[in-house]
Amino acid sequence: MEVIICKWVHALLLCCYLFSFVADSVEMLNGGGKVRGVNLGGWLVVEGWIKPSLFDGIPNGDMLDGTQVQFKSVTLQKYVAAENGGGLNVSVDREAPSSWETFRLWRVSEAEFQFRTSGGQFLSCDGQGSSVSAMAESPSTTETFYVERNNINSRVHIRLLSGSYVQASSSYQLRADYPGKPGWDDNMATFEMIIVSNNLHGDYQLANGYGHDKAAEVLKRHRSTFITAEDFNFLSNHGINAVRIPVGWWISLDPNPPAPFIGGTLAALDNAFLWAQDYNIKCIIDLHAAPGSQNGMEHSASKDGSTDWPTSSEHISQSLDAINFLASRYAKHPAFLGIELLNEPSDSEVPLNVLVSYYSKGYQIVRKYSSTAYVIICQRIGNADPMELFQANIGSSNIVVDLHYYNLFDNFFVNLSVIENIEYIYKRRQSQLQSLNRANGPLLFIGEWVNEMSLTNASQFDYQDFGRSQLEVYSEASFGWAYWTLKNDRKHWDFEWNIQNGYLQLGDSPNKNIPSIVQLLALSCWMLSVASDSVTWRNKTDKRREGGREGLCGTLELLYNIYS
């Protein structure tokens, strides 16, 4: 009898232990553990390099907002220059181009443009016979020019809206006094246009390039097909428990955001939360694009590469309004995990005191709607030390510092071998992570990283080793990590492609622990039944106890069948 009871007790203890193990595992999957995340980049904030085909139908697609151009007189063989970078007259007397000879386009239509100097002023001409100057602080009709392009070569004509053509004069000035209509021969009104840089392909360029109606058509199709419920199913099946979703500030004014932005991102974000809830995935909303741009890059929806966010109190206020809108809308949603207040502010353009003030206000806004939501603050990109945010005292609870780790975008990485790239992860990245973890401050999040190097001949095994090293090290981050990005035309940046083709191996999914635990739980119930059967024949009168055991075992048998 003592042996039988001992077996019964052992089975009961095993059952209780496994119950607690299951409970802990479920809590981990529901947010109690670290983030194993993926970014949904290029979806609600456009990044042309992620999906270049979005821009294929734009006329004069190489002359989008922010494109940098230079003009060289074909007769004088000298460059058009804004003296001192703007604020004075315009000459045609430079032998070699530099910043004074470079202009950023503001696109008015497919053939009408405004030219912004390096100093921020605009080329301007009052009318026929007038000289062109560079003193206008804001553009209007007198700062708008037609650009006529030769279909064969890079030659162009520049004319005023009134019809007068601009020419290089014999005194090396730029004047609107060419007689008649010029041909494409070597004449004073013909210039060679050199496109120096055309690397901005964001929301602003797409919407302003197509025009509202066509852009709305393109973006509606993109937003409804690029990310779908099936993608959340894929992520869940591969152990991903969170998504970081970049959004633009104009989402708070949906469905009618200010021009040229196109409405519809809010409905798409609502869908993401529904899909996330269906697949037990958490959502981090990331303010990726702030008004005026926080870094001058396309993913911040910069108009021309300028970083105007930190110098405008209105821009900062609009950003806080967007945080307020997002927090009030999603704070109580079951799939909501947190908000990132700003993505990748530039260390050279955004002063630390301005950023800390903004982060502190953003933290207080989120706390109005949730006492537990994670408030994520991104490091300044460039050469800033992330420790500056640990010392900033932004808030008292659930603060997360986001670091972005790429073995790219710096000449240091260009000539590194695979082994050297991996050594850098262990020696530099791991050392920094461990140091920050010991700082006893905010949680740490590697919010962007990628399985890509500055190499052209790396093998699949090389990528597997590089990815494995990053996963091992970045898993030490106290909050977790998120891969950049789910889908990308560049395959090594594409999380889905990496997984499906075996270039990135995540290891066991946390979800896969649950079936085995339930099976063991059912096994313990069977052991309990065997042990208790020996007692039952000695105590047949206790039908209530027997019935209770049968009910428990029946439930666990059902669970076993479901997960087996």
Image (spheres, grey):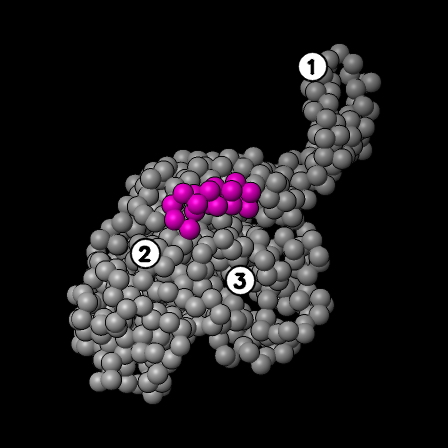
Residue type at tag 1 = Arg
Q: Is disc 3 placed on a helix, strand or loop?
A: strand
- Residue furthest front in the image: 180
Tell me the residue that label 1 is attached to: 544
Label number found at residue 228: none
Q: What residue sits 36% from the left and 48% below the top?
A: 261
Q: Is disc 2 placed on a helix, strand or loop?
A: loop
Q: Choose mark 2 or mark 1, whichever is in front.
A: 2
Question: Does 50 sit above or below residue 373?
Answer: below
218 vs 115, left or right, is right
Question: Does 97 sit above or below residue 142?
Answer: below
Q: If you read the primary sequence from the N terminus, does the residue marked by circle 3 or circle 1 appear first?
A: 3
What percent of the width, then of the height, locates residue 401?
A: 41, 59
Q: CA distance from mark 3 to mark 2?
A: 37 Å
Residue type at tag 2 = Val
Tell me the residue that label 2 is attached to: 108
Query: Is 215 a magenta residue?
Result: yes
Using the image as rendered, state which of residue 13 and residue 485 is in the foreground. Answer: 485
Q: Choose mark 3 or mark 2, whichever is in front.
A: 2
Using the image as rendered, state which of residue 3 and residue 562 is in the foreground. Answer: 562
Q: Which residues are magenta?
A: 210-227
Tell me the residue that label 3 is attached to: 449
